[in-house]
Each structure stands twice: as C-alpha cells, then as structure tokens.
Image (cartoon, grey):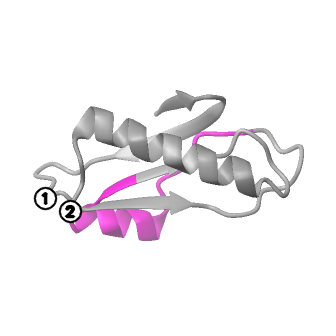
Amino acid sequence: TGVIAGAPYRIDVPAGWRGGLVVYAHGYAEAGAPARTPPLNGWLRALLDRGWAVAQSDYRRGGWAVAEGVEDTERLRAHFVARHGRPD
C-alpha cells in the first residue's frame, strides 16, 4: 500500500505469482469523499487466490474524475511494472 501522486493504492501479489495482473478501476466516487486505501474485496481476493496479482487505487479526486482516474490507474500500472516486473 502507499500513495502515488495523491492517490492511495494497494497491490497484492500471491506467492508463486505466475505473471497475470488485474488492474481494478473502481469507477465513480462521491465528490468530496476522502481518498482511502482500497480494501481487498471478496471477488478480488478470489482472483488473488487463483494466482493473479491485483492492483487497485483510489483516485486523487472524487466526483466525475474520468481523466484523473485514467491517469492514476496508469501510474499504478507503471509502478507495478517497476516493482514487480512486466505482467504477462
């Protein structure tokens, strides 16, 4: 977990990772809601349990933040590659 450019993130990599990555973009968040580290929800945990790495971030701004969401998700993907290598 951490923060990239104001967007809290979470990366989970299973033991014996085989190279698959799911990057989850959560969609709309209420304007003015504080950014928070995303939880590992049940269906994302199911992917992790099946050997997939999971990366997800909140966005640095809530509301209709399409551009910020795209930018924050791409920063997270690049951070994953820098730390864990290029996924399959």
In front of the other: 55 or 48: 55
Residue at image mark 1: 18
Task: Name the N-terminal-most of marks 2 and 1.
Answer: 1
Q: Residue at x 40, y 36 (%)?
A: 79
In front of the other: 48 or 27: 27
Instruction: Determine the CA span between mark 2 and mark 1.
Output: 6 Å
Q: Amino acid at mark 1?
A: Arg
Local SS, label 2: loop
Residue at image mark 2: 51
Q: Nearer the viewer, mark 2 or mark 1?
A: 1
Residues at discs 2 and 1 in contact (Cβ within 8 Å)? yes
Q: Up-down: is 86 above or below 43?
A: above
Q: Amino acid at mark 2?
A: Gly
Q: Up-down: is 2 above or below 76?
A: above
Q: Is residue 57 visible?
A: no
User: From which residue to which does the magenta span run?
Assistant: 35-54
Q: Residue at x 22, y 42 (%)?
A: 85
Give left or right: position of 13 versus 73.
left
Within 10 angstroms of label 1, few (less than 14), some, or many (20 or more) residues? some
Local SS, label 1: loop
Give left or right: position of 59 versus 4.
right
Q: Is residue 10 visible?
A: yes
